[in-house]
């Protein structure tokens, strides 16, 4: 497993590209997909230590994507992000084993701390 490689999946391409820059500045490797189906298709078990997943995306929401990713790579940890903090999907995400849910806009420093803790565990 790549202990410091993060999979970023968000249909907002600008946000995803910005997140990749933040992650790389913090010493992580990162790849992003703006289409959950493409991210799922490209997943190779062990490539990523953690997935950072938007909860609301067209075609497949973040909870559905998380479930599908875990079928391919059961060791993959995940953190959700959403602009809709009171959404029912937040409870579903946490209930499905996602480590945390960050509200957008995210505090980059808090996110990096959470990511470092998650990949170290």
Image (spheres, helix red, strand yellow):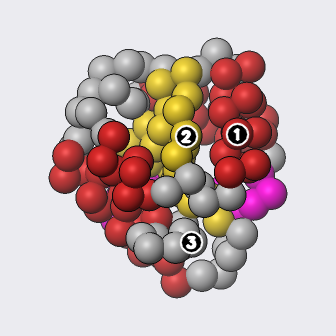
Magenta stretch: dominant secondary structure: loop
Which of the 4 image quarters holds residue 18? top right
Q: Quick check: is 100 in the magenta stretch?
A: yes
Q: Which mark is residue 56?
A: 3
Residue 83 lies, in percent from the top left, at 71, 69
Which of the 4 image quarters holds residue 66? bottom left
Real-space CA distance between mark 3 and mark 2, rounded to the nearest whole angstrom: 16 Å
Give whichever of discs 3 and 2 has the lower sequence position: 2
- Which mark is in front, 3 or 1? 1
- The residue depicted at 68 percent of the width and 76 percent of the height is 84
Give the class, few, some or many, for how many residues have Cα within 10 Å of label 2's Cα (few <14, many ≥20). Answer: many
Q: Is residue 117 visible?
A: no
Q: Residue tagged by mark 1?
A: 17
Observer-nearest residue: 99 or 1?
Answer: 1
Give whichever of discs 3 and 1 has the lower sequence position: 1
Label 2's element?
Answer: strand
Q: Which mark is residue 32?
A: 2
Residue 19 lies, in percent from the top left, at 70, 39
- The residue depicted at 55 percent of the width and 21 percent of the height is 29
Quadrant, the C terminus: top left
Kindly indicate whether the residue at mark 2 contacts the one at mark 1 (C-beta within 8 angstroms). Answer: yes
Observer-nearest residue: 41 or 106?
Answer: 41
Magenta residues span: 96-106
């Amino acid at each position: 497993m790549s202990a410091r490689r993060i999979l970023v999946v968000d249909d907002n391409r600008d946000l995803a590209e910005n997140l990749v820059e933040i992650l790389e500045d913090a010493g992580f490797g990162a790849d992003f997909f703006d289409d959950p189906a493409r991210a799922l298709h490209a997943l190779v078990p062990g490539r990523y230590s953690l997935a950072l997943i938007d909860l609301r995306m067209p075609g497949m929401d973040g909870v559905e994507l998380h479930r599908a990713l875990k079928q391919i790579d059961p060791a993959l940890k995940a953190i959700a992000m959403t602009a809709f903090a009171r959404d029912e999907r937040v409870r579903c995400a946490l209930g499905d084993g996602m480590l945390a849910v960050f509200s957008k806009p995210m505090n980059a420093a808090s996110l990096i701390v959470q990511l470092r803790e998650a990949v170290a565990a």
